[in-house]
């Protein structure tokens, strides 16, 4: 294509999405991929529309975008199946001048490697004048996969349609000069930032990418730049939470065993609390109309007593906190508002007491159901069960509750240089702290894990171990092996061997830039894979930011992310080019209106001691031309990782 800005149209075809009864996820997802991919220029001009499954409506948009808006590439999603309302191929066929069957063959062929259901898709591809029109399936996954399948050919196809003769000739020469090579550089790379087949890999799809064993050992041919864009932290978190679905399975837990879990169903009270009118104070049950003055004491009533005492005018009954207010009494006067008038048995028995205050009806009495009414919902599904919730459950008589099952979590480290703490160090070896830090951190959050040891730096071992982990666990958390080193095999194995979707491979943050998040399907179930950096601090920080929120969501938490508070810097600091998560100790002096942040010292990502005593991560902004340093007293956000 020429150097003009690429115009792309994304058209979602769906009755339900067009009338608002369903959310369109496929169209916005395609827009996101096009913007982030970089293969079609820096800032492609993207137009979007959603229409019903009507031939005329679809044709109207295709004709307008092709003839009037002059869109270069139109991607439709939806309406390509066998259902009676699936008419996108028919509408497209009525619009295009010539077909492009090669694109259809590529999509169907590669889709059949993913699912046999691909044979039920009827896409049409072709061009009208200088606009290429491509039909994708309606699902977010299917449309994303098909886009990735044909993406390598799209820049050259657009150049041909636009008659960009210079670039077409250059492309043909390049293709001929590298014929048979699988690692050539696409001639469109200069303008489109188009990646080689190995580089583009598919960082956002789970298509199969076969990779020979020998490829992993071609050190000289490894990528010198990461093919993964650096995502902002919040976008990366959003992706993780979108993929972290609730495990969904329920289990019954005894009351004390339910602590730290999440309720799977609502809880209702079968009885009122209190089930009787109860005294709030230690004092005397009285008839309010009697007012102040001397009264005869007719007997004590203590908590738990089954008393048949009845209070008549002129009399009172001594009563304890929580005891049943006797019949006839309509108020309680606390003992502090009385004085003894007459006693017997050397003070052992009260005969009469003087009431010093003016009692009011209902004073210091909890009526039936004051705290909890019969039939009242006391806890809701997705409520976290802490100590207060356990108390409520006990109050309403629950001895067991249904909770969401926690995900099964595997923890392992990677690297030839890593050894267990009890093993004598060899040359070039270090002790593995990451597994123990992450396991204990997740345990403190209420998640049980399985220690799966250390995976050595071998493509075969990484592949074999991951196949085992995927068969047994819902979530896999590793550390190390995700940067640009010659022994960093994880991403290659995930994409090329395990058919995993790598949703992101770098994050714009410090520490933790190489953090990688992927998903893989095993027997129809999606498994989450967190590949954390190998430096100890990076592993712990990214575990807080990405792993724990995902696990919380999978376990049913309604609010999975950590709390963020404002804090005042107790030290000055130069800002980094990347947003920094600075380990800090927050304290709250009585004279301050905000907690004060103290540094834990050197923030080197290998220095695990910088995590010691830290209860928060300061969220420092990246350095800007007009902001290079924060001084003492500056107000910043702090993400809480432990109690203040």
Image (cartoon, helix red, strand yellow):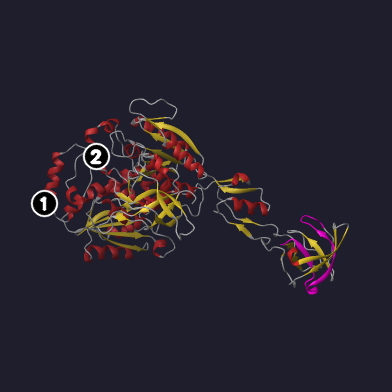
Q: Is residue 153 magenta?
A: no
Q: Secondary structure at mark 2?
A: loop
Residue 292 found in image quarter: bottom right
The number of numbered badges drawn on the structure is 2
For residue 447, side relative to residue 461 (left or right): right
Q: Residues within 10 Å of mark 1 (few under 14, many from 20)?
A: few
Q: Which mark is residue 166?
A: 1
x and y, in percent, of residue 79 in the image: 36, 57
Q: Secondary structure at mark 1?
A: helix
| 153 lies above or below 270 | above
Res 624 label: none
Pick whichever, 424 or 347, lies toward us: 347
- Give the percent coordinates (x, y) of residue 600: 40, 46
Q: Is residue 530 visible?
A: no
Q: Position of residue 225 (x, y in %)?
A: 24, 42
Q: Please state which of residues 491 and 423 is positioned toward the viewer in this rendering.
A: 423
Residue pictured at 75% horizontal, 71% vertical: 357
Which span is picked out in magenta?
Answer: 280-306
As drawn, 290 above or below 214: below
CA gap, disc 2 and disc 1: 29 Å
Q: Nearer the viewer, mark 2 or mark 1?
A: 2
**Image quadrant in which you'd find residue 347:** bottom right
Q: Is residue 111 above or below residue 269?
A: above
User: 407 and 520: which one is in front?
Assistant: 407
Q: Which residue is mark 2?
A: 223
């Amino acid at each position: 294509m020429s150097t003009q800005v690429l115009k792309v149209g994304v058209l979602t075809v769906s009755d339900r999405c067009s009338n608002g009864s369903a959310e369109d996820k496929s169209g916005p997802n395609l827009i996101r991929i096009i913007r982030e991919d970089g293969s079609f220029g820096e800032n492609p001009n993207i137009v979007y529309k959603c229409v019903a499954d009507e031939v005329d409506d679809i044709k109207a948009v295709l004709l307008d975008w092709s003839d009037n808006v002059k869109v270069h590439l139109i991607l439709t999603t939806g309406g390509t199946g066998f259902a009676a309302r699936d008419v996108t191929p028919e509408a497209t066929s009525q619009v295009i001048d010539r077909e492009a069957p090669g694109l259809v063959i590529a999509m169907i062929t590669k889709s059949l490697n993913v699912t046999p259901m691909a044979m039920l898709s009827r896409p049409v591809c072709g061009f009208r004048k200088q606009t290429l029109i491509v039909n994708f399936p309606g699902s977010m996954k299917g449309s994303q996969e098909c886009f990735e399948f044909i993406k390598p050919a799209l820049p050259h196809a657009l150049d041909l349609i636009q008659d960009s003769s210079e670039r077409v000739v250059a492309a043909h020469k390049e293709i001929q000069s590298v014929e048979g090579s699988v690692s050539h550089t696409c001639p469109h790379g200069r303008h489109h930032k188009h990646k080689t087949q190995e580089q583009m890999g598919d960082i956002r799809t789970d298509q199969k990418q076969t990779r020979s064993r020998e490829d992993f050992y071609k050190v000289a041919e490894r990528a010198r730049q990461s093919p993964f864009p650096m995502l902002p932290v919040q976008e990366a978190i959003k992706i993780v939470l979108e993929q972290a679905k609730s495990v969904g399975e329920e289990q019954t837990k005894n009351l004390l065993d339910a602590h730290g879990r999440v309720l799977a169903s609502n809880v209702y009270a079968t009885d009122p609390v209190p089930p009787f009118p109860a005294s709030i104070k230690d004092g005397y049950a009285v008839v309010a109309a009697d007012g102040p003055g001397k009264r005869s004491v007719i007997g004590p009533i203590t908590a738990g007593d089954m008393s048949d005492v009845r209070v008549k005018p002129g009399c009172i009954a001594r009563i304890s906190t929580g005891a049943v207010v006797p019949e006839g009494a309509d108020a309680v006067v606390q003992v502090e508002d009385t004085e003894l008038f007459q006693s017997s048995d050397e003070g052992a028995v009260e005969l009469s007491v003087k009431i010093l205050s003016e009692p009011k009806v209902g004073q210091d009495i909890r009526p039936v159901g004051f705290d909890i009414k019969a039939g009242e919902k006391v806890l809701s599904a997705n409520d976290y069960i802490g100590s207060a919730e356990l108390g409520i459950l006990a109050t309403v008589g629950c001895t067991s509750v249904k909770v969401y099952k926690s995900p099964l979590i595997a923890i392992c480290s990677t690297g030839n240089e890593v050894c267990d703490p009890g093993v004598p160090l060899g040359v070039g070896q270090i002790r593995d702290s990451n597994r123990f830090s992450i396991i204990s951190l997740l345990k403190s959050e209420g998640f049980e894990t399985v220690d799966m040891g250390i995976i050595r730096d071998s493509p075969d071992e990484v592949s074999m171990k991951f196949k085992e982990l995927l068969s047994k666990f819902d979530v896999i958390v590793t550390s190390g092996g995700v940067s640009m080193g010659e022994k960093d095999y994880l991403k290659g194995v995930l994409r090329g061997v395990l058919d995993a979707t790598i949703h992101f491979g770098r994050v714009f943050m410090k520490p933790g830039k190489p953090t990688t998040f992927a998903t893989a399907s095993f027997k129809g179930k999606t498994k989450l894979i967190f590949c954390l950096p190998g430096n100890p601090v990076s592993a712990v920080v990214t575990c807080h930011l990405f792993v724990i929120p995902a696990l919380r969501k999978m376990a049913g938490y309604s609010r999975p992310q950590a709390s963020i508070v404002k804090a005042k810097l107790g030290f000055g600091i130069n800002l980094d080019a990347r947003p920094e998560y600075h380990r800090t100790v927050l304290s709250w002096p009585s004279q301050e209106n905000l907690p004060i942040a103290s540094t834990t010292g050197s923030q080197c990502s290998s220095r695990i001691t910088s995590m010691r005593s830290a209860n928060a991560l300061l969220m420092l902004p990246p350095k800007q031309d007009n902001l290079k340093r924060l001084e003492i007293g500056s107000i910043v956000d702090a993400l809480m990782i432990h109690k203040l």
